[in-house]
Image (cartoon, rainbow, N blue to C red):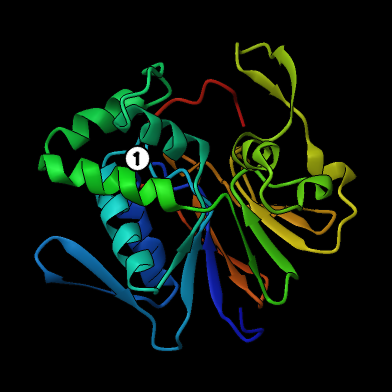
Amino acid sequence: MPQSILLDIIGDVHGCYPELLALLAKLGYDVKHPHGNTPEISHPEGRKPAFVGDFVDRGPDSPGVLKLVMHAVGQHRAFAVIGNHDDKLMRKLMGRNVQINHGLDTTLAQLEKEPPQFSIRVRRFLEMLPHLLWFDEQKLLIAHAGLPEKFHVPGSKRAREMALFGPTSGKLDDFGLPQRINWAKDYMGKPFIVFGHTPVREPVLLNNTINIDTGCVFGGKLTALRYPEMETVSVTPEKLYAEPRRPF
């Protein structure tokens, strides 16, 4: 990718379509609907959003988020990596046996209101999404849950799993969820890594990494990191859409 690329890296949306539109407007994007309900985005300075994944589940309008992201990526006006919630939806749409929890039931109910062809398009889109993206001559790496340096290798199945879910201890925490390991505190790599996955109240900059999942769907904020300016821009949600199982 060219070194001069201007990105707005957006954290976990989780179906918060009104907040996504508000954040894009705050970032200076123009959102139009020239073809019915398909949103089309552009920026006067040529900036492009890059999504860290988890477009769906828990929020009020996962289909709306998907329509915007799918169209923008298809028009080469945005970039995106897949998140663990997106991966689970993909597997469900492929006919796999998955547990309907953590907001997937909400997404499936919303998709039932769309034409059947839309779910096929969603599945195909998610199937082609990468688990990581490099920019700026490999000075910048975007992965949903981040990625420890030893997994910065192409074609690794384990790297994909790590990028989607992050490292865990193999135990459950006090809230019955997988106990996550803070890989960023030991990160010593050269690429600057932008990720989400684990909600935090404010963006956490640590050891050449930044977590920008500020828990919009849980009443926090939807945050973008402007690159290369290294400035964060956030909007607050219209309401609390879901109660977090793990406080953040």
Left or right relative to 176: residue 192: right
Q: Quadrant of residue 239?
A: top left
Specify the quadrant that holds the N terminus: bottom right
Please say whether residue 57 is visible from this viewpoint. Answer: no
For the point 37% across and 57% down, the residue is 20
Left or right relative to 97: residue 148: right
Vertical placement of residue 71 versus 174, above or below: below
Left or right relative to 35: residue 208: right
Q: Quadrant of residue 201?
A: top right
Q: Quadrant of residue 90?
A: top left
Please say whether residue 102 is visible from this viewpoint. Answer: yes
Q: Position of residue 69 (x, y in %)?
A: 35, 59
Q: Position of residue 14 (x, y in %)?
A: 41, 41
* Residue closer to the observer: 153 or 183: 153
Disc 1: CA contacts within 10 A as few (<14), some (14-19) or many (>=20):
few
Q: Amino acid at mark 1?
A: Lys
Specify the quadrant that holds the C terminus: top right
Left or right relative to 152: residue 235: left
* Residue closer to the observer: 237 or 124: 124
For the point 29% across and 46% down, the residue is 122
For the point 49% across and 47% down, the residue is 82
To which residue does mark 1 refer? Answer: 239
Vertical placement of residue 180 versus 233, above or below: above
* Residue closer to the observer: 57 or 2: 2
Q: Secondary structure at mark 1?
A: loop
Q: Position of residue 31 (x, y in %)?
A: 27, 72
Q: Position of residue 37 (x, y in %)?
A: 13, 60
For the point 25% across and 49% down, the residue is 121
